[in-house]
Image (cartoon, rainbow, N blue to C red):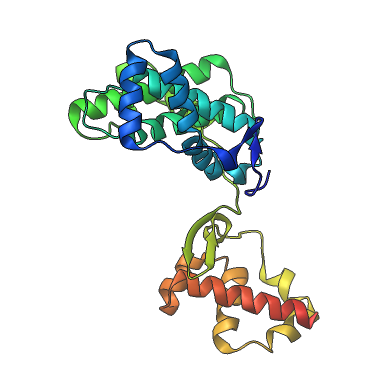
Amino acid sequence: MKYNKVEICGVNTSSLRVLSEEEKRELLGKAKKGDTKAREKLIDGNLRLVLSIIQRFTGRRENLDDLFQVGCIGLIKAIDNFNIELDVRFSTYAVPMIIGEIRRYLRDNNSIRVSRSMRDLAYRALQAKEEMSKDTGSEPSIEKIAEHLGEKKEDVVIALEAITEPVSLYEPVFNDSGDSIYIMDQISDTSSTDEAWVEDIALRDAMKKLNEREKKIIDMRYFQSRTQSEIAKEIGISQAQVSRLEKSALERIRKSF
């Protein structure tokens, strides 16, 4: 799916209307009294909100039609459960509801299958964590959660890890003036060895064409298996600069080959 696609689930997204806060309040009041047409108008008037949220998940290569439908379920739940007596904007309440519904769908449809019992334990642990956090004002430890549930600490840890969504190594974690730092940049490469690199004469010749700072970065990154964060701290520059210099040096090496 592309960002500029204007039709999702048969809906022409370019023609979707946006409701004002006053219109939302009025329709929510009518919907609470059983007015089905007001409820339908609320759903139609907030589809752009769903659309904007599912764009956050496009990097996962999920079908946007499916995510849009799941997001609409979250929207409907938000409409049906919203308390109009509270001084809260509807979107403030609806956004986390929609995101939660999408994340639940992604967890349950993960290609790595997780047993029902393990998922149930994980969800119970998350619920207990939320309740205990509200009661104490601080996040409980895994030990406390396990004790609260009457489960083994190890089982709770495994269950929570099992429902954690896989993260791409190419997912950006920081961006500085167009220079993105990816998760893979945070990981040390312990498989690279001095012998494997030094034996390649072409690589050594290419390395000679780099300036001293570039040589140092390539040496620390690939010969010493250091992370970009460690290199940045030692050299005294930002991690984004290390990333930029590393990419530039590698590009020059590739051209030399």
Query: Residue 217: x percent and y percent?
Result: 56, 77
| Location of residue 200 in the rendering, given as x and y in whole percent from the top left corner | 78, 76
**Quadrant location, the N terminus:** top right
- Whether residue 92 is visible to the viewer of this picture, yes or no, is yes
Classify 127 as above or below 169.
above
- Closest to the observer: 222 or 32? 32
The location of residue 117, given as percent across then percent down, is 52, 14
Which residue is farthest left?
136
Q: Position of residue 174 (x, y in %)?
A: 47, 60
Q: Is residue 225 above or below residue 134?
A: below
Q: Residue at x 58, y 18 (%)?
A: 115
Q: In which image quadrant can residue 25 be found?
A: top left
Q: Is residue 166 visible?
A: no
Question: Which quarter of the image is occupied by the C terminus?
Answer: bottom right
Say which of 199 and 221 sits in front. Answer: 221
Q: Residue at coordinates 60% horizontally, 82% vertically from top-left?
A: 215
Q: How many marks?
A: 0
Figure check: 18 above or below 183: above
Tell me the residue at 19%/33% (across/down).
137
